[in-house]
């Protein structure tokens, strides 16, 4: 007979979504699932149990087995999702992945379970809940910093709002790893800005139990604190069940 598990004695299970390569990058004519190992390493270091999840798992099962979820980095969001024509060079993320993650987002928000969006993950969260994007930062924003993207990584400082979840972790500023050429244009309703870069680009947003950041914490000095923050919130959520 199966013995029930006391989840309070277990590390929280943190789901990490993956990218889908439809035969373009890894191996021609074959579909592959992939994600940087740094995500699972960061979750494990923070005290969580990382599990990679994909559209082959139903969104309902993902919501059942995961105590928190990370929408990992990826390619670009199609402008059609926020009512615009294509006006810049984009490398569109898999439609299969986008459809599935949007369903996962709805389930996690409905249950008030912890969510972390990273780069593409932040952009998807903002668009899904009613916001829009700059299709290309340099095409849409004068005097923009170099934020990387399209295969390039760089670093810059962000200024953190005093009333944000990030302020107790880092104070008023942090230096982050940036690799995005798109960014939030219109912020989704009910979300608040948690951090901005020196050129005014929104770098982090918060709402309910959702934190989304434009940079890659698994690749810079902010990672330990951010992934530990997610794991601790997942533990709190387990306690409330």
Image (cartoon, rainbow, N blue to C red):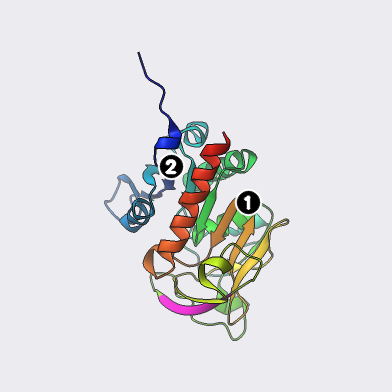
Q: Is residue 16 visible?
A: yes
> Is residue 199 positioned above or below 96 on the image?
below
Residue 155 is a magenta residue: yes
Residue nearest the observer in this picture, 162 or 195: 162
Location of residue 53 (image quadrant): top left
At x 55%, y 47%, the residue is 114
- Which mark, residue 76? none
Dot 1 corresponds to which residue? 128
Q: Secondary structure at mark 1?
A: helix
Question: Can you give x and y, in whole percent of width and height, for residue 62 in the image?
Answer: 47, 36
| Range covered by the magenta-colored residues | 154-159
Location of residue 30 (image quadrant): top left
At x 26%, y 51%, the residue is 27
Q: Secondary structure at mark 2?
A: loop
At x 56%, y 66%, the residue is 168
Q: Is residue 141 left or right of residue 55?
A: right
Q: Taken as a whole, is the magenta stretch helix, strand or loop? A: strand
Residue 158 is a magenta residue: yes
Residue nearest the observer in this picture, 84 or 148: 148
Question: Can you give x and y, in whole percent of width and height, for residue 107 in the image?
Answer: 59, 38
Dot 2 corresponds to which residue? 12
> Is residue 215 positioned above or below 58 on the image?
below
Q: Decide which of tag 2 and tag 1 comes sooner along the chain.
A: 2
């Amino acid at each position: 007979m199966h013995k029930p598990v006391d989840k309070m004695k277990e590390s929280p299970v943190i789901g990490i979504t993956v990218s889908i390569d439809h035969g373009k990058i890894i191996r021609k004519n074959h579909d592959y699932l992939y994600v940087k190992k740094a995500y699972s390493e960061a979750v494990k270091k923070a005290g969580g149990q990382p599990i990679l999840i994909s559209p082959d798992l139903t969104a309902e099962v993902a919501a059942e087995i995961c105590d928190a979820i990370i929408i990992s980095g990826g390619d670009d969001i199609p402008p059609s999702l926020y009512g615009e024509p294509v006006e810049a060079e984009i490398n569109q993320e898999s439609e299969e992945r986008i459809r599935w993650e949007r369903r996962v987002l709805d389930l996690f928000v409905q249950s008030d379970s912890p969510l972390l969006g990273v780069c593409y993950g932040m952009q998807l969260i903002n668009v899904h809940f009613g916001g829009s994007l700059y299709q290309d930062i340099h095409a849409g924003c004068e005097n923009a910093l170099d934020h990387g993207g399209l295969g390039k990584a760089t670093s810059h400082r962000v200024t953190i709002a005093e009333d944000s979840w990030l302020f107790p972790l880092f104070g008023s500023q942090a230096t982050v790893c940036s690799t995005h050429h798109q960014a939030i244009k219109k912020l989704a309703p009910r979300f608040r800005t948690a951090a901005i870069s020196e050129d005014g680009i929104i770098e982090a947003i918060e709402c309910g139990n959702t934190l989304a950041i434009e940079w890659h914490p698994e690749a810079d000095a902010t990672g330990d604190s951010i992934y530990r923050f997610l794991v601790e919130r997942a533990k709190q959520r387990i306690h409330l069940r």
